Image (spheres, rainbow, N blue to C red):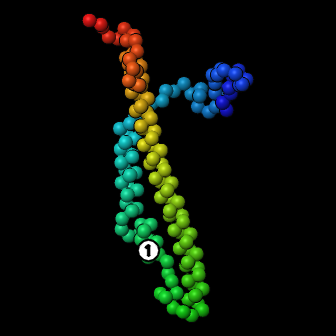
């Protein structure tokens, strides 16, 4: 929970996180191996792409997965079977599409996490070297020598 100090209404008094928030007291620094995550991302992207071409893809199921009365015949037993297969087809199609959407969301979230981590590293390095990443310069903090 975020608690805003100063009671609101007036000027901004800053904010602090609830000290009982999970993970805040871990004492661990945020550190990921970008190269490992990028390798994992490549595997996930390649795997995700495999769902878009060939047999068993969503397009294949949508095109060929529904069994119709024309294929089963026009008699009472076939009509009942077609009603069952149609419901199964609809459910499978919906679930498969949801799976692919979720899978893509995982990939997108990992890509964003790597991007954010790289931005954080760039900003931290620039700050340590006394360089603004917004295009303006700041004090050199003694890290460079003026001639």
- Residue for badge 1: 63
The N terminus: image quadrant = top right
Residue 61 to residue 104: above or below: below
Say left or right for 121 vs 29.
left
Residue 131 to residue 23: above or below: above
Q: Residue 15's spot in the image, x, y percent?
A: 63, 24
Front one among 13 and 48 = 13
| Residue drawn at point x = 59 percent, y = 28 percent | 24
Q: How packed is label 1: few (under 14 Cα within 10 Å), some, or many (20 or more)?
A: few
Residue 14 to residue 84: above or below: above
Q: Residue 64's spot in the image, x, y percent?
A: 44, 76
Q: Is residue 44 visible?
A: yes
Q: Secondary structure at mark 1?
A: helix
| Residue drawn at point x = 59 percent, y = 81 percent | 83
Residue 104 to residue 68: above or below: above
Front one among 35 and 90 = 90
Name which quarter of the figure residue 79 lies in.
Answer: bottom right
Residue at far top of view:
147
């Amino acid at each position: 929970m975020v608690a805003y100090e100063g009671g609101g209404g007036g000027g901004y008094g800053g904010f602090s996180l609830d000290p009982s928030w999970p993970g805040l007291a871990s004492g661990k620094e945020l550190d990921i191996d970008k190269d490992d995550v990028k390798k994992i991302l490549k595997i996930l992207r390649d795997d995700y792409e495999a769902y878009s071409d060939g047999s068993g893809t969503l397009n294949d199921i949508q095109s060929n997965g529904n069994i119709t009365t024309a294929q089963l015949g026009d008699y009472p037993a076939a009509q009942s079977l077609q009603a069952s297969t149609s419901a199964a087809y609809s459910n499978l199609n919906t679930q498969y599409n949801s799976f692919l959407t979720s899978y893509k969301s995982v990939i997108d979230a990992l890509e964003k996490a790597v991007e954010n981590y790289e931005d954080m590293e760039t900003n931290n390095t620039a700050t340590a070297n006394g360089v603004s990443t917004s295009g303006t310069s700041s004090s050199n903090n003694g890290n460079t020598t003026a001639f």
